[in-house]
Image (cartoon, rainbow, N blue to C red):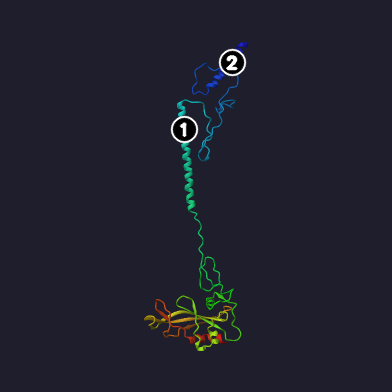
Amino acid sequence: MSDTGAGSDQGATGNEEQRADTAWMPSAVPGPPPQPATGPVHQPPGTGYGPPTAGPPYGPATTATPFGSAPPYGPYPPPGPPSSGRNRGLVVAVAALSVLLLVACSGLIGGAFLLGSSPREAAEPEPAAPPVAPWRSSGTTPTPGATASVEPSTRGPQPSDFPAAQISDLNDVCDGVLYYPQSPKRTGAAPHPVALLVGTDMGTGRRHDRVYYYDEGLSKRVERTWASEDPKAVQIVACLDRTGTGATIRKCRYDDPKPDTLTLLKATYRLRVYEVATGRRLLDKTLGGDDQQCPFVVLYGPDKKIYAEVSHRSLLSALRNLVKR
């Protein structure tokens, strides 16, 4: 009895080792039928027949995929036992096909990103700097983005921080842009010095007329009253601008510097008088161009037209009360 039990154990163990060795083969070698095992059976890991207790030293498979992404179907199963040449070729073909599919998918994903990012970059150009607007140098600060203008400010004339430095600065008083608090007011005893600024046809602003007062006398005292050249002494400024033109009066012929004929036209003017220190308007009057003789010296444009001017007598008559009272 003891010999039979020992033989049975030995036979079971031998059969167990034989089955463990042949379990990895693609086809079993004919042999004696297996005997019932009485001890633990060793199974290859991952066969689905319960937790393995021992087996080949293979762990989970790993592989490198493009761009560091994981394989789309999870970890590969552990490599099997050595196979025949036909099975090995099939495995290689499947692995190569998988790599090609991974590369193709990666390329498609990368291409979609580039196509999606290119229009976004093109749709977001760099913002352009806003253009810098010109501005007057007369002392006013322009609104950002606004262009320079000689129109009177909607807020009215503003006080200048500095006194008038030259007679031409008084054009800002005529335009309703500035007034000069540092100038003397029209108060106290007469006379009240005045500067007459006359608009020109050449687009260069107003000129200072220093000859219209000759009927009042030619003394220095009279000159300082009617045509002062000191802007700090002027109390009132008279602004004369042409506002309209009319019919032809006559043709004026000139021989110097070369023979030429100009057309003299009727015209109307606006005379405004302001106190320099406050910008207060003292007079606003329409005058006709009553001097209808051909002027002795004249400036003219390409249209060869000149305009009848306000006579000196009419200017003195309009200003006399403001200057001498």
Residue 77 location, x and y as percent?
53, 31
- 321 shown above or below 155: below
Residue in the foreground of this view, choosing between 127 and 233: 233
Residue in the foreground of this view, choosing between 123 and 200: 200
**Left or right: 291 in relation to 140:** left
Q: Which residue is mark 2?
A: 10
Residue in the foreground of this view, choosing between 69 and 299: 299
- 35 shown above or below 61: above
Looking at the image, which residue sits at the far right? 2
- 130 shown above or below 317: above
Residue 296 location, x and y as percent?
42, 84
Q: Who comes first in sequence, dot 2 or dot 1? A: 2
Q: CA distance from mark 2 to mark 1?
A: 44 Å
Image quarter where the C terminus lies is bottom right
Q: In percent of the image, x 46 and y 34: which residue is there?
A: 96
Label 1, secondary structure: give it. helix
Residue 34 location, x and y as percent?
54, 18
Looking at the picture, which amino acid does disc 1 mark? Val
- 81 shown above or below 321: above
Density class for disc 2 (Cα within 10 Å; few <14, some 14-19, many ≥20) is few
Looking at the image, which residue sits at the far left? 259
Q: Which residue is mark 1?
A: 94
Residue 185 location, x and y as percent?
59, 81
Image quarter where the N terminus lies is top right
